[in-house]
Image (spheres, helix red, strand yellow):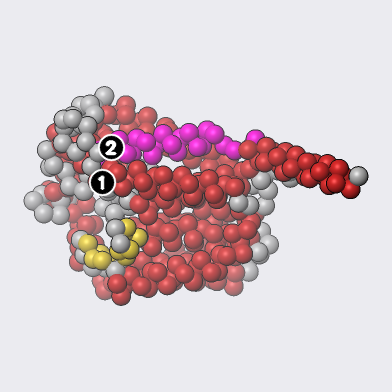
Amino acid sequence: MSSIAFRRGRASGLRAIGNADADLLKHFDWVMFAATLLIVSFGIMMIYSTTTAAGPLVLNLVVLKQLIYGGVGLILMGILASIDYRFLANWTWVMYVVMLGLLALIFVIGRETFGSTRWIDIGPVALQPSELGKLVMVLVLAKFLADRPRGRSNLVRFLISLGLIALPFGLVFLQPDLGTSLVLAAVWVAMTLVSGTRWKYLVTLAALALPSGLVAWLWLLRPYQIARVIVFLNPEASELDGGYNIIQARISMGNGGLTGQGFMGGTQGQLDYLRVQHTDFIASVIGEEFGFVGMIALLLVYGLLLWRMIRVARLARDEYGELIAAGITTTFLFQIFVNVGMNMQLMPVTGIPLPLISYGGSSLVTLLAAQGILQSILMRHKKLNT
């Protein structure tokens, strides 16, 4: 009798676990997943276009690496979706310390490229800690702000959150990497606003930022960073130097017209007039090959993805989940806005990648992992029936 009761109890327990898993999967956002997969696939296709000469299909090393990064990112997405996101709150401060350590380690063993030291070579893999830092800071700020009551006007709370972001902001800025620094700043502003911080604190900080910006312009910014701003205002003044790629990007966009010149049919991209076209300026290649219609279609898919992310923030069962979703959404939105803007000569060149499309393992893996956390929040936004 006891063995029969044991088997029945075990079967009942397995059914309960199965029912809980089914309840979780019922809330998985397949629309967000499909939009993400579509953008990643399109990105790999565009990386192929920018790194391969027209002709027979050849799987080059750059495309192969991006495929591997995408696979690793999707595995991480699945793992993080299966884990209760609240478990991450126990490790945020450990992640914060490790992130600061990696950012500091860059100055010791980092590899310099184009005047900036952003990568640590680990065998065949180039790790960019600042990309990982974006997600870590979302988790750290969400934990800190959620532990304090919403709408609390305590100035100390505001200043501590500012201090938390200031450390990685400073280390990234000194690499120098102004683009990623701006992403961190945008994430902090968005998350503090969502958490109920008073506007007057941010307005005061913005007023103080004006003289700080002047100090940075005169003494902190590198010559090439200042040159980027000057070139942005008048690229024709240095059309064979700093303004060259801006002009080529503008030509690429114009060549696309309404429907584009076709996949791998763009002149500026295929003839290599446009530089770094598989990373920072991949949006210009998209505009040339698929035209205005293609760019609008891409932005619509991005819009669908952002809408589903905002939906996660709205449905989150606690402030911690809501703040994580707000931070991740801001990361995507800010990078899309800046990257497309600089490709259209609406903003200075800052080196911010186009999310899920530009080549880069650290960026792709981190953004896909972030998607997994969003799915975890959504899958657990209601209490499970046990």
Q: CA distance from mark 2 to mark 1?
A: 11 Å
Whole-percent x, y for residue 369 in the image: 48, 50
Front residue of 63/357: it is: 63
Span colored in magenta:
26-48
Magenta span contains residue 33: yes
Amino acid type at mark 2: Met
Q: Quadrant of the C terminus?
A: top right
Q: Earlier in the sequence, mark 2 or mark 1?
A: 2
Q: Which mark is residue 33?
A: none
Whole-percent x, y for residue 340 in the image: 32, 43
Which residue corresponds to mark 1?
Answer: 62
Whole-percent x, y for residue 225 in the image: 24, 62
Q: Residue at x 54, y 59 (%)?
A: 139
| Residue found at the far left of this picture | 240
Res 356 seen here:
yes
Q: Residue at x 29, y 72 (%)?
A: 109
Magenta span contains residue 280: no
Q: Secondary structure at mark 2?
A: helix
Which residue corresponds to mark 2?
Answer: 46
Res 313 seen here:
no
Give the class, few, some or many, for how many residues have Cα within 10 Å of label 1's Cα (few <14, many ≥20). Answer: some
Q: Quadrant of residue 341?
A: top left
Amino acid type at mark 1: Val
Front residue of 268/37: it is: 37
